Image (cartoon, rainbow, N blue to C red):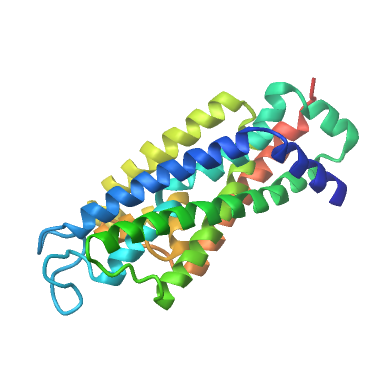
């Protein structure tokens, strides 16, 4: 397993894709954090998302300072998680596209070991994306909030705790991506499905079900909501559209998705002949 894990990390880090996606994520998260911080800081009194001006929500702000900061600082696990997912998916589907999976399985014929090594190799990759994405989001968001005269709350214990859990959520998302890429195998289809589901399908489902009283408890079990639950805050929960699971449950649910996808891959993709 150690040799297989070392091999998987080497294969990932010797390509350009990991740092190209990382730089893209930095630009994307900086843009989102800046825009969202600006928009929320200028919310009209009484027109905010999920809050009413009062003792904890100063006049001119729709969110209390801490809620405002947490909503902006958790944009990485709310919207930016697509990058570690894609990176994880490419680490497997890329091997099938370029047929490097053949020498991989010749070097280590135990397919469960190969899959396990790929899942474990996703952890440090996800950690890197989580740290960089979270720091970019917080740095940009805090700078905009400070420039607008708002308290960025950077020393608040809850902000620091949430930042740490946001990194954890991004780390787990990379493992989910590995399982998804292994189950789907086709690189182009994997990327398209990831983008469509994370950026369109799940947000639409969560928004629509948020207005159906009998189904309002369903969205919190979706993978995106589970990732946000790990962080402990999100744009969706701040808006009052969806509630989140407790952090521990969110972690279990998201890990469950990763293991389910890996099991599907082991029973389908990795049982077939590789040519």
Instruction: Name the side, left or right, on which 128 lies relative to 108.
Output: left
Residue 62 appears in which quarter of the rendering? bottom left
Instruction: Name the side, left or right, on which 163 lies relative to 36.
Output: right
Which residue occupies the foreground of this view, 162 or 60? 60
Place of residue 28 in the rendered image (x, y in percent of width and height, measured from the top left): 41, 42
Place of residue 77 in the rendered image (x, y in percent of width and height, measured from the top left): 45, 53
Q: Residue furthest front?
A: 147
Does any portion of residue 148 appear in the rendered image?
Answer: yes
Q: What's the residue at 31%, 54% (across, down)?
A: 215
**Picture layout, residue 179 above or below residue 138:** above
Which residue occupies the foreground of this view, 248 or 17? 17
**Picture layout, residue 168 above or below residue 33:** below
Q: Residue furthest bottom?
A: 55
Q: How many marks?
A: 0
Q: What's the residue at 55%, 60% (across, down)?
A: 168
Place of residue 258 in the rendered image (x, y in percent of width and height, measured from the top left): 60, 49
Image quarter in which the C terminus is found: top right
């Amino acid at each position: 397993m150690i040799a297989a894990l070392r091999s998987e990390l080497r294969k990932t880090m010797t390509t350009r894709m990991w740092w190209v996606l990382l730089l893209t994520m930095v630009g994307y998260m900086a843009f989102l954090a800046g825009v969202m911080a600006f928009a929320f800081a200028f919310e009209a009194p009484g027109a905010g998302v999920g809050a009413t001006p009062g003792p904890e929500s100063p006049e001119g702000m729709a969110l209390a300072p801490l809620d405002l900061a947490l909503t902006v600082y958790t944009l990485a696990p709310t919207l930016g998680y697509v990058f570690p997912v894609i990176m994880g998916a490419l680490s497997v589907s890329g091997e099938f596209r370029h047929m490097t999976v053949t020498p991989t399985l010749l070097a280590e014929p135990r397919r469960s070991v190969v899959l396990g090594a790929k899942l474990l190799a996703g952890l440090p990759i996800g950690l890197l994306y989580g740290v960089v994405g979270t720091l970019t989001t917080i740095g940009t968001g805090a700078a905009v909030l400070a420039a607008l005269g708002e308290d960025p709350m950077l020393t608040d214990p809850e902000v620091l705790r949430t930042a740490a859990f946001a990194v954890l959520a991004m780390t787990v998302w990379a493992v989910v991506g590995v399982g998804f890429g292994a189950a789907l195998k086709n690189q182009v289809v994997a990327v398209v499905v990831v983008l469509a589901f994370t950026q369109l399908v799940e947000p639409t489902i969560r928004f629509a079900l948020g207005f159906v009283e009998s189904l309002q408890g369903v969205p919190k079990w979706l993978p995106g909501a589970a990732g946000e639950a790990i962080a402990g805050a999100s744009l969706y929960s701040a808006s009052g559209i969806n509630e989140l699971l407790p952090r521990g449950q969110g972690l279990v649910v998201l890990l469950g998705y990763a293991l389910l996808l890996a099991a599907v891959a082991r029973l389908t993709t990795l049982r077939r002949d590789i040519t």
